[in-house]
Amino acid sequence: MPCFEISFDLSSFKELDHLALLATQGYNLGSTGDWFGEFRGGLYGFYARVYGVQRHYNEVHAWLPHFRSMTETEYHLSTILFQMDSALECLAFALNALGWIVFSVDFRDVTDAKALKRISPLDILGDATKIPPISPLAGYKKVFPATQTAWQNESPLIAQIRDLHDVSKHRKTIFEGGEARSDPPEGFFEALGTTDDPTRCALLRPMSEVILKADPKLPAIHRTPSAVHQGELLEVLVPSFAKLIKTTGEAALADAQATVPLKEKQFRI
C-alpha cells in the first residue's frame, strides 16, 4: 500500500549540531571565519527544506475540501523536487563548513564568496560523466568517509532527484499521470454535498499514486511507451529520500565524532 504521509528522522543532525557548537568554543577549534554560522545556516536551511518535502507530500495525498487538478499536482511535485534537491545542497554547505575548520585546505573556503558559490553535492560525490571529470573534494574522505560512501551508494537516487528538479525548474512538467485515492473518510462527500454527483466526487479525490517522468531530460521525440517502474513513483522516491536522510545523519554524526578533534568533550559550566 502506498505511503500517504512521510516523516523524517532528524535526531542525528541535532546531535551533530550539538557537536559543532561544542567544537566552536574557544577551548576547542574556535570560531575562525565564523564557520559555525555557515554550518548552522546550512543545517537550518536543510531543516526548512525537509519540512517542505513533508508538507507538500502529505498534502498531495490528503483528503481536503477542495477540487483537485493536474496543475495543483504539478505544483506540489515541482515544490517537492526543489525541496529535496535543495536539502542536499544545504547539507553539502553545512558539512563543508564543519570540514573546513578541521582541514581547511581540503574544503571550500568559508571566508571566500566565490568558494561558497561552488559548494554542491558533487563535492561529496564527484561526477565522472563531466568533461573533464569532477573529483570529490579530498576532505570528505578524511572527515566524512561514511557519509561520502552513503551518498555514493545512493548516487542514482540523488541523480534522479537533481534531474527531475532541473526539468521542473527550467523546462516542463514532470507529472505523467497516476491514480486517485478511493478511501475517503467516513462522511467526507456527504459533508460537502457531492454524494450524488460522481464528477464532483472525482474532482475531490487526492492522489494515491503519482507517476514521474522517466529519463526527464530525454527529448519527447525519443520517448516510447513503457511500463511504469517502481522508481518512477513519487510514493517510492520520497520514502527512499527519507531513508537517505536518516542514513546521512547517522553517518555524518559518526564521522564527526571520530574525526573532529575536540580537546574538551563537554561544555564548560
Image (tube, helix red, strand yellow):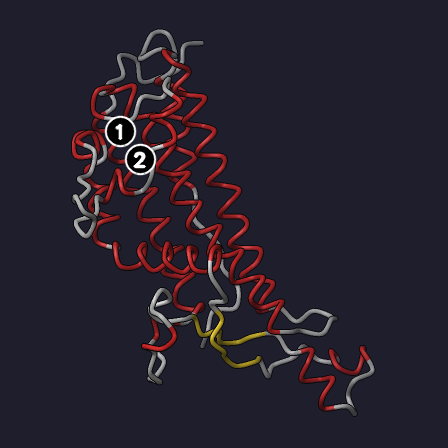
**Residue type marked 1:** Gln
The residue drawn where x is 33% and y is 83% is: 224
Q: Position of residue 198 (x, y in %)?
A: 72, 91
Q: Name, please, the residue furthest toward the front.
A: 221
The residue that mark 2 highlights is 253
Alpha carbon separation for disc pair 1 and 2: 6 Å
Up the image or down, 101 lies above or below 43; here it is above
Q: Position of residue 213 (x, y in %)?
A: 41, 71
Q: Position of residue 26 (x, y in %)?
A: 37, 7
Mark 2 neighbour density, 10 Å: few (under 14) some (14–19) many (20 or more): many
Relative horizontal placement of residue 70, taking residue 219 as reference (left or right): right
The kind of secondary structure element at disc 1 is helix
Tell me which corner region of the image, top left, top right, bottom left or bottom right, holds residue 260.
Answer: top left
Is there CB contact under 8 Å for labels 1 and 2? yes
**Residue type marked 2:** Leu
Image label count: 2
Which residue is more in the foreground, 227 or 243?
227
Which residue is more in the foreground, 182 or 136?
136
Q: Give the label on residue 257, or none.
A: 1
Which residue is more in the foreground, 157 or 10?
157
Q: Position of residue 146 (x, y in %)?
A: 21, 41
Up the image or down, 39 lies above or below 51; here it is above
Tell me which corner region of the image, top left, top right, bottom left or bottom right, holds residue 185.
Answer: bottom right
> Which quadrant: the C terminus?
top left
